[in-house]
Amino acid sequence: MSNEVDVQKITQNARFSRFHGLILFWCVLILVLDGYDLAVVGAALPSIMKQMGVDAAKAGFMASSALFGMMLGAIYLGILADKIGRPVSICVCIALFSFFTAAAGLTHDPLSFSVTRFLAGLGIGGVLPIVAAQMGEFAPRKIRGRLVTLVFAGYSIGGILVALTGKQLIEAYGWQSVFFIAGTPILFIPFILLTMPDSLAFLVQRNRTEKLAQVIKKMAPEVQVSSRDRFVMPQEAMVTKAPVAKLFQDGRGFSTVMIWVAFFMGLFMVYSLSSWLTKLMAMSGYSLGSALTFVLVFNIGAMVGAVGGGWLGDKYNIKHVLVAFYATGAVSLALMGYTKSTELLFLVVFVVGASTLGTQLLAYAYAAEFYPATIRSTGVGFASGIGRLGAIAAPVLIGMLVAMRLPLEQNFLAIGLAGVLGTLAVMMIDHRRSAANTHGAEALLSHADLPSSASS
């Protein structure tokens, strides 16, 4: 006789085990590698500009080519994950960003460099929402927010690795060396395919009962299941898409636009700095080693901001926390151009890291809380897509400012202006329309639902 088994309920109530630890290990490692691939251009940009003979404006376009690929990768590889499963999709992304980042090290002109970075960007952008969705789906409910935050922190660790190794590698072997190292993650693909489970929703939809029974036995050994059981999930957990028009219904229209503006500005700040911080600090008179030390401090701050922002967002009104983070980012960026003491500048750069990448993580969490479950994936997906336009524009616009040889202070003020606009946008969101207010019980899922939302 078969029993009806609620897969989502078992997942949410499971205790953290070696099974969860393995998923966490892979998800963090993959985003460390992903973060390295994204940050590597910023570290190498001064050397690339010198060797290829390009000005700052053209270098900005070269840096943004990967970001354009990221936008397309996040959209289309996320859809691919629904069709072929997450482990295979993750490995496709790893193959893309590893192979083509390494290939960028073989290029000698701006066009071929941009093409390879665009193709690498498909993988860099595609893997983040898939990995975050994977951790979010399997994590026990009580610690889901913390586990997802840890996964996102992997991005900053990748940037830290670039800062720690970039100077020695570039000075000893040339800028190409930091790109060649990025090809090694391909070696992990067979192990990921062997050990990473498929999405539970994916298995339920395809009625793969034997596989479901195996996964549940590993995840919750105390639960007795067999392949003869009927595995089910709540309907809202199976929802992947909703019409865009629904984002503008029930009084949410203006707030949806403000969320899009906030995402645009948040990602503008993050990618302005990831692409140009090394060059801007070099323009301030710092050596490559010192400039990369600032990148290291920035990424440590980003990691602290990501973890701290998630904790504050759970503890206090997340809208108020988000406003404070955007405002802090704007003020600290403005101070960067006017801080002359090196020791004090390190502190400012730390705060900038915490209040830019930390802000973006909170923005994802807030968008997930704002929309009800039936349109959450569409809401967060569109906000992320609009935000990617800010990421693409950032290296180009800041590159144009650098090419104009304006005073250094004005470059940082331009980036900080995005923080001011982001602050105003979040302040104008009508929090009364948030799902947290209209459906009190659903608010408990807000931060936890971030990954599944980001997967679209």
Image: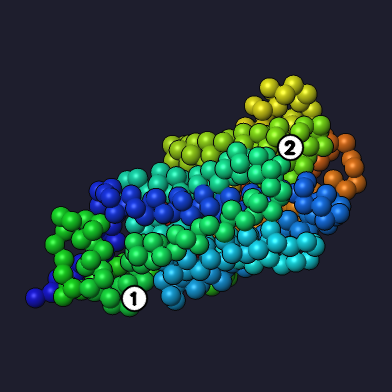
Q: Residue at x 21, y 56 (%)?
A: 220
Q: Which residue is mark 2?
A: 288
Q: Residue at x 49, y 36 (%)?
A: 308
Instruction: For mark 2, give the secondary structure.
Output: helix
Picture coordinates of residue 448 (x, y %)? 41, 51
Picture coordinates of residue 131 (x, y %)? 46, 58
Q: Residue at x 34, y 75 (%)?
A: 205
Q: Residues within 10 Å of mark 2 (few under 14, many from 20)?
A: many
Picture coordinates of residue 392 (x, y %)? 71, 58
Q: Can residue 389 be seen at all in this image of the molecule?
A: no
Q: Which residue is mark 1?
A: 205
Extreme residue toward the left, this view: 1
Q: Disc 2 marks which amino acid?
A: Leu
Instruction: For mark 1, give the secondary structure.
Output: helix
* Image-based side of 437 in relation to 387, left or right: left
Q: Residue at x 29, y 54 (%)?
A: 19
Picture coordinates of residue 157 (x, y %)? 53, 43
Nearer the observer, 38 or 331? 38
* Image-based side of 182 in relation to 202, left or right: right
